[in-house]
Amino acid sequence: MYFCGFKFMSRNRYYFIIILILGSLATISPFSIDMYLPGFPAIAKNLHTNIDRVQLSLTAYLIGICVGQLFYGPLLDRFGRKTPLFIGLGIYIVASLGCALTTSVEQLIVMRFFQALGGCGGMVASQALVRDIFPKNKTAQAFSLLTLVIAVSPMVAPTVGGYVTSLFGWHYIFITLAAITTVIAITAYFYLPTGKGPDSSMSLSPASVARGYYTVLSHPQFLTYSLAGGLATAAPFAYKQAQQRYSSISTRSASRSMVGYSPLLL
């Protein structure tokens, strides 16, 4: 059998590989949040600042994710799935290299914001492509598997980040992120189905986009699911906040690589 570049492959195995690709796209931003956390003390020392200032780079990243997702939805509908996705991945790769080359915490904060603007395209596009690629009776299962792949990121990323920081320095965290995303982008380009094509009837005027978001926000079911999802992610983010507040432990009683294992307990 033949499915989008995969020869002599069963449909179930094809769907499994597509889930891995979509999951990789969706984990770019979560990985970018968690991987550099063990490097906070080293970043603060190298940039001659304190951890509280470095933590603003995490805040900037979260703001970038929130802002970026508002734009990617309409763009993916208007121009198709892949064009905005690859533009976003390109922005992410360039910004990641910019993070590695920063010489001040202010530059890091700005680069992290643009890194988030690019990276969150993978989060939005992966969700949209599930509906495009999978039949309706497989959509729920696909979303469940996608969530499972995403859930691995907070467990793996801090450990990897801890070892990279210890062995090579914090700059290589962002070089590693750029390299990983480049591999993901190449794989998605050659093997990921196109999904829904461009829709020229889709208006990108602010009024039209605002009406669309108003329709979604006025739906009680959406608000219920959003609240449940927000509460479910509150505990990990509260942990990350506390971890950075006391992350100096990595320089006193534990190695950075060992601190990276702590998310595995969540």
Image: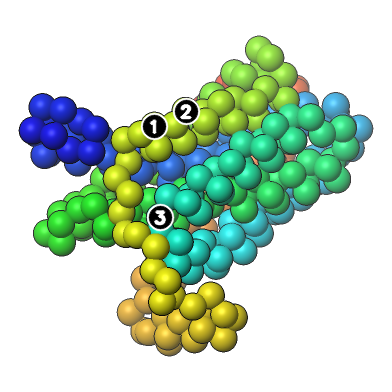
Q: Amino acid at mark 3?
A: Arg
In this view, the mark in front (3 or 2): 3
Judge by depth and name the residue closer to the eye, 73 or 219: 73
- Local packing at callout 2 (Cα closer than 10 Å; few below 14, some 14-19, many 20+) is few
Identify which residue is drawn at 55% across, 48% down.
87
* Disc 1 from disc 2: Cα separation: 6 Å
Judge by depth and name the residue closer to the eye, 140 or 118: 118
Judge by depth and name the residue closer to the eye, 254 or 154: 154
Task: Tell me if I can see residue 220 in this picture.
Answer: yes
In the image: residue 164, left or right of residue 121: right
Identify which residue is drawn at 45% across, 67% down.
78
In the image: residue 168, left or right of residue 196: right
Contact, mark 1 vs mark 2 (Cβ under 8 Å): yes
Q: Which residue is mark 1?
A: 187
- Local packing at callout 3 (Cα closer than 10 Å; few below 14, some 14-19, many 20+) is many
Q: Earlier in the sequence, mark 3 or mark 1?
A: 3
Dot 1 falls on a residue whose secondary structure is helix
* Disc 3 from disc 1: Cα separation: 15 Å
Q: Which residue is mark 3?
A: 81
Which image quadrant is residue 4 in?
top left
In the image: residue 188, left or right of residue 115: left
Numbered badge on residue 183: 2
Residue 211 picture location, percent across and down: 49, 86
Q: Residue furthest front?
A: 200
Identify which residue is drawn at 39% across, 38% down.
188
Which image quadrant is residue 131 in?
bottom left
- Above or below for 24 versus 229: above
* Disc 3 from disc 2: Cα separation: 19 Å
Judge by depth and name the residue closer to the eye, 162 or 172: 172
Q: Residue furthest right?
A: 48
